[in-house]
Image (cartoon, rainbow, N blue to C red):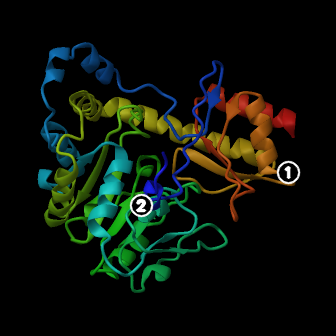
Amino acid sequence: MSGNWENSVRRVTPYTPGEQPKESGVIKLNTNENPFPPSPMVKKALSEFDADRLRLYPDTVSKELALELANQKGVKPEQVFIGVGSDDVLSMAFLTFFCSDKPILFPDITYSFYDVWASVYGIKYRTLPLDGDFKIDPKDYMRENGGIVIANPNAPTGIYLGLDAVESIIAANPDSVVIIDEAYIDFGGKSAVGLTDKYENLLVVQTFSKSRSMAGMRIGMAFGSERLIKCLSDVRFSVNSYTMNTVSQICGLAALKDKEYFEKTRSEIISIREYSAARLKELGFTVTDSAANFLFASPKGRSAGELFEKLKQRKIFVRWWDKPLISDHLRITIGTKEQMDALFAALSEIL
């Protein structure tokens, strides 16, 4: 017997993540994961973990992890919010801060989860176009709004907006919460975390998924004024008090303490990124000036969609969107030097 229950269902177009191929021998350059393993200190923490602890609920505020983050970022522990990956943090931030009748603002080319969250929570939004070089014009964000979200460096372009420009947007919007999504900040540019004491309306979101090689652990964090973080925490605790599991808290703390390994792998990715950008240009690609762990590249005189499919046939996965303005580009995650050389060999053969 069928009823009309579907008439009361919330319907949205969901976010589409990059493919997660299961076959062996794949070179996976499509989801901006780190090609290097997590810190050896993470592996040590896992090997020493007492599974009996799992019968207990985890620390609701991830106190040790928050303290270490606060220490390294130069903020108070009360200015730190921990979530299950930056997606969870951003989702909670949308739910908490974007309750106005005015539309929130974000770029038309950016992380494609923003419009999904807006739709899920019934938030009005307006997308603002990037310029011809895929860059943000801060003046576009100096208008009436119900909040602002900017990924910096942006995705999928990898372009970084200078801190002075970021601050000009925050300063011009004292009546709105401005979220700076810094998922890729460790690969280039200066973080806005240092501005959180100056601007009470600023929330800076970061993640362990990229530069810490811990996408599988789902650890995200936000930094802001004490009042802002309290508002965010109040909403989170009204939804789920036990979001960050015990194992993730322990491994996250271990990763933070291994500063030497973090700097080593971060620097290696930046070096391979610059090498890869040069190789792509030699192959006739136009490449944006990326400050992230990926490159946004357009092939000259060839279809990006065609290259995407031909690389896939060779078990090399990159990201391509059949969307206006970016359908002639591929987003290529930075892998190991060997993986990138395999990509360039395949591209040379195809081209």
- Quadrant that contains the C terminus: top right
Tell me if mark 1 has few (under 14), some (14-19) or many (20+) residues whose alpha carbon lies within 10 angstroms of its own.
few
Residue, x 35% and y 26% (percent of image)?
Answer: 39
Residue, x 36% and y 57% (percent of image)?
Answer: 191
Tell me if mark 2 has few (under 14), some (14-19) or many (20+) residues whose alpha carbon lies within 10 angstroms of its own.
few
Q: Is residue 297 above or below residue 132?
A: above
* Residue at the disc numbered 1: 302
Location of residue 294 (image quadrant): top right
- Amino acid residing under circle 2: Ser
- Amino acid residing under circle 1: Arg
153 on left or right of 18: left
* Residue at the disc numbered 2: 8
Question: Foreground: 320 or 339?
Answer: 320
Q: Is residue 3 above or below residue 48?
A: below
Mark number for residue 276? none
Q: Is residue 62 above or below residue 251?
A: below
Question: Foreground: 155 or 55?
Answer: 55
Residue, x 58% and y 38% (percent of image)?
Answer: 334
Q: Where in the figure is residue 208, as x and y percent of width and height?
A: 36, 40
Question: Foreground: 328 or 115?
Answer: 115
Q: Where in the figure is residue 56, as x and y percent of width and height?
A: 12, 26
N-terminal of the pair, mark 1 or mark 2, is 2
318 on left or right of 165: right
Residue, x 65% and y 68% (percent of image)?
Answer: 133
Q: Is residue 10 visible?
A: yes
Element under label 1? loop
Location of residue 63 (image quadrant): top left
